Amino acid sequence: MSTAILRGTFESFEDESKNEAGNEKPRNTGATRKLDVKIAKAVHVAPARETFGGLYALSNIDQTFPFVIEIVFAFNGEGRGRRSAAIETIRESLAKALVEFYPFAGRLVMGIDGRMAVRCTGEGVPFVEATSEDDIVVLGDISTINPAMLRKLVKHSDGAPTILEVPLLSVQVTTFKCGGIVVGIVMNHVLVDGKALTDFIACWNDLARAKPPSVLPFLDRSVLRPRQPLRVDLPHHEYAPRDQRPGLVVDPQTKPLVYRSFCFKPHALIQLKKAARIATQNGSSVVPTTFEVISALVWISRTKALGIGPHETTKLLTAVDGRPKFDPPLPSGYFGNGIALSCAECSAGELTRKPFSFAVQTVREALASVTESYIRSAIDHIELNRVLVDCERNSCCISKWSRLPFYKMDFGFGRPFQVAPATVSDNVIFVTSQSRESDDLVVSLGLTSNAMDVFSKLIQHELTLKSKFQSHPWIRVYEA
């Protein structure tokens, strides 16, 4: 297999060069294009009318996610003459949506019991209006992770000393000369997960189009309160040991990371699944899911790239939507963190030396273990130990965005043509859809330069071994 390794950020997936045999050949597209963005106005958008004031309690699960998520939504828009009207629509509908989703307009505080809560002050959401004299095509393919460029399109909170100083929601609307629009959203993960955010966006979109809200929030988080008496029935290695618990400080990057995105074509994923068939006790075999094989492949390659010792434990944590795991399911529109983390773990030696199907089976069993009992046990474990997610050292977290309904977002000027993370935190891996019209999946992550070089070679090598047609373009690699 010959793989195109594109060094520029803005080369499209379709723009390929071929060698004489018809295979893709590596090419260097040159330096990243410059994006100029100017801030025109920065305000706070408060709820359109008075809302609840006071403390809003958060669940135990909420306490474990002191992270920030940054997302950009790219729209073609309606032409340059409609830019101001579009911004006004987005801002006014945001104020209306905040009436129902009022915790976003508050501030995160720490109680005397050491638990975070939201003080519902109604202060509002930071809202930035920005402009660019470029056409939106300058962004190129935003599924190619490029924090240096894409973070110009979000109101990030660099410099915040702790997660308490990070707004619960921030919005930036950047309009381009051609009429294109990018809506950049930053969410404080302590308050919500991706599913809750998309519920909020659905309501916001309905109001922007003068429609009644199709989704309203279920705000009572006591449905995830600890049991009495507390009962930890299962091991919970997805959380850091209490003596190794990281703080709530938003740490500056202590080491430079290289960001790359790996685009998996559907036929590559088919071959991976065939290579990872799992034998059952009755002699038949089970074909794993796309997400299971991607997770296993990335976990193996990352473990090797980091040089984790064969006797050391390595863990892959996966965000699983816990809402449907309950009987009955959590109420529709549950507003908060309804996710649980599965934990696949083994020694690095087992992971890297055993057949690929072993890693896939380990991931599969971990995902299957996330039941109502598992989540209830985790809630009680957090109550007893006040722990955070273990996403340090030999552990990493993988999150699947490809099934979240981000591409249904519509303020009245069409749906986004691409949605992507603006950045990826250390030890976190995102799996996203390449675009609205594509079946390709994109895996994005950051590693140190040397580790990333090894990781890229390992991913390509593994696909070569598992592919049926060695000359086929199974994967494309992009570097920010």
Image (cartoon, rainbow, N blue to C red):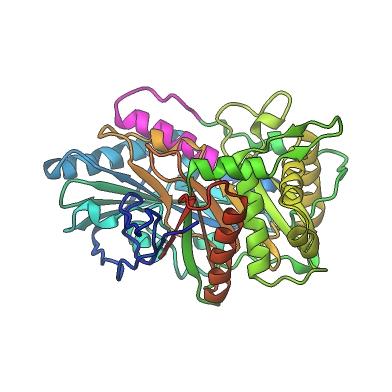
Please tell me which residue is depicted at 74% across the width and 54% down the height of the picture: 238
Magenta stretch: helix, strand or loop mostly: helix
Q: Nearer the viewer, residue 190 or 428?
A: 428
Q: Give the residues in magenta.
A: 193-216
x, y percentage for residue 225? 73, 39
- Number of marks drawn: 0
208 part of magenta stretch: yes
Q: Is residue 375 left or right of residue 330?
A: right
Task: Give the quadrant of residue 426.
Answer: bottom right
* Residue 48 higher or lower than 445, as above or below: above
Q: Nearer the viewer, residue 356 or 449?
A: 356
Q: Is residue 459 left or right of residue 185?
A: right
Q: Is residue 145 left or right of residue 388?
A: left
x, y percentage for residue 379? 76, 44
Please tell me which residue is depicted at 31% across the width and 66% down the height of the picture: 29
90 part of magenta stretch: no
Judge whether residue 193 can be spotted in this image.
no
Please tell me which residue is depicted at 49% across the width and 28% down the height of the picture: 216
Q: Is residue 336 left or right of residue 93?
A: right
Residue reaching furthest left? 81
Q: Nearer the viewer, residue 61 or 424?
A: 424
Please tell me which residue is depicted at 40% across the width and 49% down the height of the picture: 125
Task: Give the quadrant of residue 96.
Answer: top left
Judge whether residue 435 can be spotted in this image.
yes
Task: Give the quadrant of residue 131.
Answer: bottom left
x, y percentage for residue 37? 25, 62
Give the quarter of the figure containing the C terminus: bottom left
x, y percentage for residue 8? 34, 65
